[in-house]
Amino acid sequence: MAAAAAAAAAAPIPEAWPELELAERERRRELLLTGPGLEQRVRAAGGRLPPRLFTLPLLHYLEVSGCGSLREPGPGLAQGLPQLHSLVLRRNALGPGLSPELGPLPALRVLDLSGNALEALPPGQGLGPAEPPGLPQLQSLNLSGNRLRELPADLARCAPRLQTLNLTGNRLDSFPAALFRPGALPLLSELAAADNCLRELSPDIAHLASLKTLDLSNNQLSEVPAELADCPKLKEVNFRGNKLTDRRLEKMVRGCQTRSILEYLRAGGRGGGRGGGKAHGPEKDEARRRRRERRRRESGEAEDEEVGDAGRMLLRVLHVSESPAPLTVRVSPTVRDVRPFIVGAIVRGLDLQTGNALRRLLTSQTKLHEELCEKRTAATIATHDLRAVRGPLLYDTRPPQDLKIVPLGRREVKAKDLVRQLQLEAEEHRKQKKRQNVSGLHRYLHLLDGKESYPCLVDAEGDVISFPPVTNSEKTKIKKTTSDLFLEVTSATSLQICKEIMDALVLKMAEINKYTLENKEDGSVSDTEADALSGQLPEPSANTSADKAGNASLVVEQVRVVDEEGRLRVVYPSKTDLGLAAPHVTVIR
């Protein structure tokens, strides 16, 4: 009897997981596990996620980050979480493989395994099966900061709809041939493999018909294949930090624009592959041109048939060099582990005074947050009155107790107190409405759980004008009198997602402007109603309106995003952006 009692006392007590109990009780669709207490509980579970986690079939978003004791996800993930859209397992200790493999996850779109200890992803210990595809809807895959020496040969078959692939900071010396076979990854637009050991780049990379951005900096490449110039949509390349044998090309990659580099390769420069430093004959040039045209047609880039000007919406792109006061966003290195991607743009000439234009804009923004932004888990949009924006801007991070902002309709508050206040409001609102889930802005607060620092956009006067994914500042709030706007899209997932959402936002603005000008309405939304639509507390404000003759065209002004040393990271809109505009939209560049 005494022995049995002693044995019972010595038996380990199961670790409590209150987050899982809460998620199950409230039928949550998003869950974030992080923080110092996580280490011990995962260690007690054998270096795996608790099996109870895989009994939450409603989950769409799952993040487990910063846990040095998490070595493998554990069995049951694929079977228990069939509706998962985003899986973030960054900065853990996953490796050397994944046992069992992650897939099949039929609804997964975003997978982030960065900052782990993965060395290989062989069949059975990788991302999922190839036949049928284990990740059929996956759009973004982040494997950066691991120890991978090779990629799975069947990656393209496992994730055929991949758009963004980040392999930065591994030990790769080559890409699998199957990755570049014709039609393997028809949607891949962004490939990053900087800081590896790549020795060669196959000419077959030209088969990536949708490739827009290629970063192979800091590798061991000696040549760049001339076929790279045949990628029909390629606009940004980075080969810095390699040891190219072509001295002229080596000099160009350090200082020239992508267009110049591709023209040099296209003209037969000694980049490597075909040509070998000799100019091509007319026959080869013509064959090359035909191949490019064929790839454009295959990728859907062929121009639409001309339609009449009547009924068209016009978007005129204003280049940075044409702007009298261009706006720049400088990015701090500290955002890398928090929310690293940001894209900005300026839209001029929007009529928000007439009718319900302001309401339509805010409603459209909410809809984009729900759908394309996947409830802000993929990206977050912020709109500002350009007249109140003081540039240049700094995209930075600050500890929650140090970040101060004047939220829409509120007084200045520390981010830590604001988040806590919103959490209390959310719970009270849920109880009053007798709902299982919280609503409005409060649904996004969990995205900040466990974060040691919060992202913020700071103006030249030192004021925080944006705190994604939570709120904007009262300082730059848009009103009915606003006609020029600064737009920002931030993401923890990928730059391409930022650009796609910005495309959708700009096109929606053009539609609203055209509708407003063609349908003069009597009703209008006040600035107080605008705050309510934004999910913020209202603030007493005068409803000023004025009749204003509008123009059917909008001007989209480029905004440059640079790193701490002033080197360009992204400019929007570039020549490849707004490329999928509707037939009734004309983009003038």
Image (cartoon, rainbow, N blue to C red):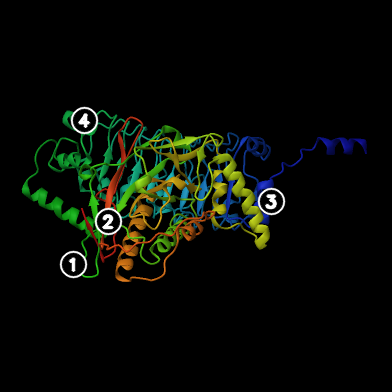
Q: Secondary structure at mark 3?
A: helix
- Rendered image: mark on residue 250: 4
Label located before the other in sequence (3 or 1) = 3
- The reply to whether callout 3 and callout 4 are in contact (CB within 8 Å) is no
Q: Nearer the viewer, mark 1 or mark 4?
A: 1
Say what amino acid the circle numbered 4 marks.
Glu
Residue projecting furthest to the right? 1
Q: Identify the residue under disc 1.
A: 306
Label located before the other in sequence (3 or 2) = 3
Name the residue: 9% across, 43% down: 280
Q: Secondary structure at mark 1?
A: loop
Q: Pointer 4: residues within 10 angstroms few (<14), some, or many (20+)?
A: many
How far apart are labels 3 and 1 at the CA level? 58 Å
Q: Nearer the viewer, mark 3 or mark 1?
A: 1
- Rendered image: mark on residue 21: 3
Q: Is residue 109 above or below residue 14?
A: below
Say what amino acid the circle numbered 2 marks.
Gly
Query: Can the viewer see residue 553 in this picture?
Result: yes
In this rendering, position of residue 456 left or right of residue 572: right
Q: Identify the residue under disc 2.
A: 579
